[in-house]
Amino acid sequence: MNRKHFLSSFLVAGLPLPGWSAWRSDGENDAPAAILPRYLKPGDTIGITCPAGFITLPEIQPAMLQMIEWGFNIKVGDTVGKKDFTFGGTDEERAGDFQQMLDDPKVKAIMCARGGYGFVRIIDKLNFSKLVTQPKWIIGFSDITVLHCHLNRNYGIASIHSKMCNSFPDDWNKAEPIQIETILSIKQALTGQKMKYTVPVNPLNKPGKAEGALIGGNLKLIETLAGTKSDLRTTNKILFVEDTGEYLYSIDRMFWNLKRTGKLEKLAGLIVGGFKIKPDDPGEEFGRTIQDIVLEKVKEYHFPVCFDFPVGHQRNNYALKCGVKHRLSVSNEDVILQEI
Amino acid sequence: MVKVPPYLQPGDTIALVCPSGYMAIEKAQTCIDVLKEWGYKVKIGTTVGSHSINYFSGTDEERLINFQQILDDDTVNAVLCARGGYGLSRIIDHISFRKFKKQPKWVIGFSDITVLHSHIYSNYGIATMHAPMAAAFNDGGYRNEYVQSLKNVMEGKSIKYEVPGHEFNRKGEGVGELVGGNLAMLAHMVGTPSDIKTKGRILFLEDVGEYLYNIDRMMHQLKRSGKLDKLAGLIVGGFSDTKDTERPFGQNVYEIIRDIVKEYDYPVCFGFPVSHEKENYALKVGVGYKLKVGKSKVMLIG
C-alpha cells in the first residue's frame, strides 16, 4: 500500500467527513490526486518512441549512450527511424509504438524522442488502462504537452516535462555546463530526487508564495486543448507556460484564451518560462512586451507570478515534474520553486 | 429562433469602425464612396484612420468606446468593421450588448470579426454578417460579385450561391443555421464564453497564412471538442497562403480536412468562395440555409 493510499484510508476511517457543501463547492475537487509513478533504479528500462515528429536512430544515439551510462537499459521503439513526412511514422504506427511502450511491463519510463507535431492525432487512440494500474514516467515537452495535460486531467498521473533525445549533447565532454546540468536534471527527476530551482529575479515579478500541483507546458498546445477531454484544470495549481516562434499578438491572444477559459482566476501561481518571440512585421508593431501581456491578464489576481523561469525551447530547460506538488516563492530577493 | 436585424433601406446609415487592427482612412475611402453610391449614409468611427502608432487602431479603451458608441447609436443601422487583424479578444468581454439585444443591427466583417459573429450568435441568438470589409472595395474590387453580394445581403435579397464542385466534395443536402468564420479564431474561442455552437448547423471555415500542421491541430481541436460530429453540413472555404514546415506535412489543407471528417456523413464542399482573397461571398451567420452538395455543383440557398 502506498503512503497516499494509506493516508486516505486513515482519513476516511478516523475523521468526520467534511460537509456535503464543501465537497460540492468546487467540481475540481473531484480531480484525481497525483499518482506518482515509481522512480527508476539502475537496471530499469527506458523506452524511446516518436509520438510526434520523426527522428533517425543516429540522432538518438547520444541520449541512449548517456542513459546507459546512468545505468538504465534502453528499448528503442519501432517509430525511431520511421518517417511519414513530418511524422515519426503513420498515426497507426506511432500510436501502436506508444501503446506497446505503455503496456510493456519491462519499460519503466518512456522518453519521447522529440516533439514537433502529431501527438493530438493519436492521443484518443491510446489506451491508458494499463498505465493507470502500473504508472510509469513519461518524458518530453513541446508537442508532448498534449500528453502531460491529458494525463493530469484524466488520470492524475505525474509526468516529466523536460528535454528529449534530440537535446542530449553529442559530446558530453564538450558540452556547456548548462547543457549538462539540464540533462542531469532529467536523471534527478527520474530517480526520485526532490527538485529545487533557483530562478533569477525579474523586477516585474509579482511576489508571493504558493503551493500546488505543478502543471503546464507549451502555451499554444494548452490553448488548442481547450474544450477537449485533455483540457487542463488549473484551480489551486501552479501553472507554467513557454512557447517558441509565435508573434507577440498571438501570445497575447493565447493568454486571453487562458483567461477567458477560466484558467487564470483560481491559480495558485504562474510561472512564465522562455518565449522565443517572432519579430513583429514592419508596421504591425504590437507595442507590448511579454511581461506587459502577462501582467495585464493577471492584474486583478493575487497569486505570485515569475518570469524567466528556465523552461522552454532553450538551453536552460530543466526537468519539471508535472502533477507533483511544489512550493513557489517569489520575492524581491529570490525566486524559488521546489518540490514538496 | 435567431433574431434577424432589419435589412437596410436607402438612406440608412452604415458606420465604419476598426475594433482590431489599424487602418488608414485612405484605404477605406473607396468603400466609403461606394457605400454612399449605394444610397447609404456613412458614419466614420474614430478608430478608422486613428492617431494610433502601433498595431491596433487605438488603445483597448478607445476601440471599446468607439465600438460601443456605434453599436448603441440609434442613427446607425449597420456596423461595418473596416478591417480585421487582431484585437477583439481583448475587448469582447467589455462590450455591452444590452441595447443591441433589444434593437439588433447588422454587424459585418470577417477574420478577427469572427469573435463578434460567434459571441453574438452564441450568447444572444442574433444574426450577423460574414462579409468583405473595406479593403475589398479597393482597386475596382467593389464591382466584383463578392462585394456586390454584401450589398444584396444588406438589402435583404434572397441568396442563392452556386459554385463549381470539387473532387473531395461529399454529396448530400443539409439544412441548418449557418455558423463559422476564421478557423484560428473559432479554435481560439473554444471553451470561452464566445464559443461557437455547431450541433445541427452548417459550419463554414476559412483561414489565411497558417501552417498546415497548425490547421491540422486546430481541426483536431474542433473534432475533439465535439464540434464536428453533429453538423448539418460543412463548407470549406479558401485557405490562402498556407505555410509548410521544413519537413513537409505531406497533405494539403483540403486533404487534411477531408480526412478529419471522413467518418461523418453530412455533406461537405471544398473551395467555397469564403476566404481572405477576393472570393468571399457575404454570409448571414445564424440564419438558416440549405446546402446542396453535388460533385459538379454546390448550392447554398438562404
Image (cartoon, coloured by chain):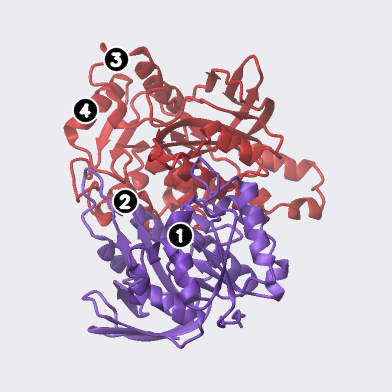
Chain colours: A red, B purple
Q: Local crowd at mark 1 within 10 Å, few (<14), some, or many (≥20)?
A: many
Q: Which residue is mark 1?
A: B28
Compute the Cα span from label 3 to label 1: 57 Å
Query: Cβ–Cβ below 8 Å for labels 3 and 1?
Result: no
Depth check: A303 or B83 in front?
B83
Q: CA distance from mark 2 to mark 1?
A: 30 Å
Q: Nearer the viewer, residue A83 or B215?
A: B215
Would you say the residues marked 2 and 4 are in contact, meaning their CB atoms lie under 8 Å apart?
Answer: no
Chain letter of disc 4? A
Three-letter amino acid code at disc 3?
Answer: Ala
Front in this rendered view, residue B217 or B109: B109
For marks 4 and 1, give the one nearer the viewer.
Answer: 1
Marks 2 and 4: which is nearer the front? 2
Is disc 4 in the same subunit as disc 1?
A: no
Give the labeled residue for mark 2.
B211
Tell which subunit mark 2 falls on. B
- Give x and y (percent) for residue A77: 25, 41
Task: Report how many numbered discs are placed on residues in the image.
Answer: 4
Residue placed under numbered mark 3 in the picture:
A175
The residue pinned by badge 4 equals: A61
Q: Pointer 1 indicates a residue of which chain? A: B
Distance (Cα) linking label 3 and label 4: 15 Å
- CA neighbours of label 4 inside 10 A, class few (<14), some (14 to 19), many (20+): some
Q: Amino acid at mark 1?
A: Ala
Amino acid type indicated by mark 2: Tyr
Q: Position of residue A56 (x, y in %)?
A: 18, 37
